[in-house]
Image (cartoon, rainbow, N blue to C red):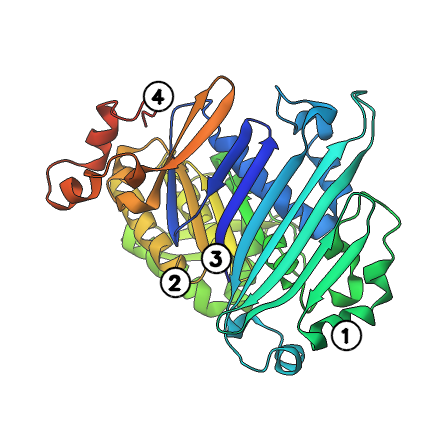
Amino acid sequence: MRLLSLRIKNFKSLADVTFEPSDLTLIVGPNNAGKTNLANAFKFLSEIYEFGLETAVQRAGGYENIAHRKRRRSKAAISFEMRIEIFPKDMDGGFFRRMHPNGDSLEVLHTFSFQANKQNIKSEFNIVEEFLRVDSEYGGALLEISRNKKSIIKIEGKSHWVKFLDNLQEVNDISDRSQMLLTHWTHFSNHLTIVGTIAKHWAIFKLNSNGSRSEGIPTPNPHVEQDGSNLPAFVDYLIHKRPESWEKVESAMRAIIPELTGISVGYLHQRTLGLFFTEENFGRPWTAEEVSDGTILTLAMLCSAIDPRTTLVFMEEPENSVHPWIIREIISFLKEVSKEKNVILTTHSHTVIDLMHPKDIWAISRESGQSILVRLSETDEDLISGWENGDFKLSDYLDTGLIPNVVP
């Protein structure tokens, strides 16, 4: 599964930006340019598909806190347009064998917008419009579904897809105008609305050492939280449930810290889980509180990225508290992970920038309260050739100020 493009309008400082990520994508720009707002947009989308629009808005602090500041309330709708490629290995076998026997890749376009009814801060918001299209790699459009602000739904496409939808009462029975199609079709959610399954498995991280050092709570399906919390429970999950993934993490940790001989998880006196690090020539293991910030954050980054249940990882400033040599190894690890899922990073680090290809870097700046997002290679037609010839490093290029208002 791959995110091909995402267009965002009127979400915080993102008045109108279009983003087309690579496998591993880097976003650079000054403070207050909008990098965190972009991360928040990904988190907001993920929560929409997992919990529904109303809950996602509430978790984001309400409509007033996500609307663009110069286009508040009913003045302009907040909208998202997402294109995702779904490969045959990602599809439900039985359903898609019947509905899509060609077995090729699908491209799903989902766009929606929602808007407050009135200027009043307590005014409710509704879906203005929503559109879903499914295209086959070789067979063209399979299905198109549109829905207007009156929740009138129109279905077109291949006859067997349309017939299937016509048999679902949920499709034509949306009474709540704040509900989205993909979160409403409960019986359909494991089939065509795989796009929702993709986005709700996005993971957004702003890791810190305090969170990564915290104790873990044993649960059947643990995740690393946004700040790194619950890392011990997730490590325990990898060790016992995903040993092939844990082997890659542990191997990377040993390459970065040669004296490290093992990482284990054990119960603490509070009956929570803790991490223990074993090194050569030491009789007892180190606890998470005793190892360096760089060590615990490196482990958190590797684990956060490799989680086999996630389909996209967005990580803010992975270079924090990590030695430049170690960050090189982390980027190498993330490049491998990105063969299976989108990995998106924000950074201020020259080291990270110089490890990337210009086409995989996006520059973000802010003008008149609006974030401007542009692919670095599109800012100068001679950039890639000059970089490939060794005329300059990318960090030096950005430091020259040739791209206005974008300094890493």
Q: Position of residue 121 (x, y in %)?
A: 79, 21
The residue sitting at 30% across, 46% down in the picture is: 359
Q: Considering depth in this image, is 237 or 396 the residue closer to the camera?
A: 396
Image height of 329 relative to 71, above or below: below
User: Mark 3 to mark 4: distance in Å?
Assistant: 46 Å
Image-based side of 65 in relation to 235, left or right: right
Q: Nearer the viewer, mark 2 or mark 3?
A: 2
Residue at image point 47% right, 32% down: 35
How packed mark 3 is, by other alpha carbons closer than 10 Å (few <14, some 14-19, many 20 or more), is: some
Name above or below for residue 198 compared with residue 357: below
Instruction: Identify the residue position indicated by label 2 in the image.
Output: 248
Image coords of residue 196 (percent x, y):
65, 57
Would you call the spot at circle 4 few (<14 residues within 10 Å), some (14-19), or many (20 or more)?
Answer: some
Q: Amino acid at mark 3?
A: Ser
Determine contact: label 2, label 3, CB under 8 Å.
no
For mark 1, what is the residue?
163
> How far apart, in angstroms, are the residues tagged by discs 2 and 4?
39 Å
